[in-house]
Image (spheres, rainbow, N blue to C red):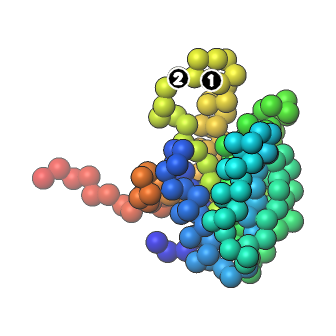
Amino acid sequence: MPLYRRVLVLGGARSGKSRTALQLAEQASSKRVYVATAQAFDDEMRERIALHRLERDRSWQTVDAPLELSQAIQAQTDPEKAVLVDCLTLWLSNIMLAEHDPSHEADQLIHTVREAQGPLILVSNEVGQGIVPPTPLGRSFRDEQGRLNQRIAEACDAVVFVAAGCQILLKPVPALDLRLA
């Protein structure tokens, strides 16, 4: 896949999206920053965070940004450095649980993505292909995540969907010949 400046990597849980994003960042630059949005509230999450850290070698700098994502991207973006954000789904969850306005926060993030000065790879879960969440909060989150993914995809140069470790380039889409034979 050719290198793009801003890339959204979408997929379901355990689809291989983080691994794909790491590979893209490693292709883009020898200087790399991993912007982590996870918060270690329990032992399971601490273990998940530790496993993600093991996937990165010492060449990676890690910045924690569970809420202040736009500011972290602005502080780290540089034409000579690849910035990987993992993941927008946890960030949005943090925003909503902190009772921040998701629409306002998304506006700030979209502006930051558009203004990024170097390679920027964003990871997000595709949440619209599963069951309808049983709670109002779950449905609200799913809707906000779907809207955020659409807006981020529009702001990015490329969108990659990952399923079972396989990458599918969704954007840019080559022109299709829709003539019927």
Residue kind at label 1, given as amino acid type: Arg
User: Crowding near pointer 2: few (<14 within 10 Å), some, many (20+)?
Assistant: few
| Image: 153 above or below 141 | below
Q: Position of residue 75 (x, y in %)?
A: 87, 65
Q: Residue at x 53, y 63 (%)?
A: 20
Q: Residue at x 49, y 26 (%)?
A: 131
| Image: 106 above or below 128 | below
User: Which quadrant would residue 23 be assigned to in this image?
Assistant: bottom right
Residue carrying label 1:
139
Q: CA distance from mark 1 to mark 2?
A: 7 Å
Under circle 1, the secondary element is: helix
Residue kind at label 2, given as amino acid type: Val
Q: Position of residue 125 (x, y in %)?
A: 58, 44
Asked if residue 118 lies left or right of residue 97, the reply is: left
Q: Nearer the viewer, residue 107 or 43?
A: 43
Of callouts 1 and 2, the N-terminal one: 2
| Image: 79 above or below 91 | below
Q: Which mark is residue 28?
A: none
Asked if residue 148 lies left or right of residue 99, the reply is: left
Q: Residue at x 55, y 37 (%)?
A: 127
**Are the residues flagged by discs 1 and 2 in contact, CB closer than 8 Å?**
yes
Residue carrying label 2:
132
Q: Nearer the viewer, residue 45 or 174?
A: 45
User: Crowding near pointer 1: few (<14 within 10 Å), some, many (20+)?
Assistant: few
Find the residue positioned furthest to the left.
181
Asked if residue 104 lies left or right of residue 119, the reply is: right
Q: Position of residue 93 (x, y in %)?
A: 73, 37
Under circle 2, the secondary element is: loop
Find the residue positioned furthest to the top.
135
Q: Is residue 125 visible?
A: yes
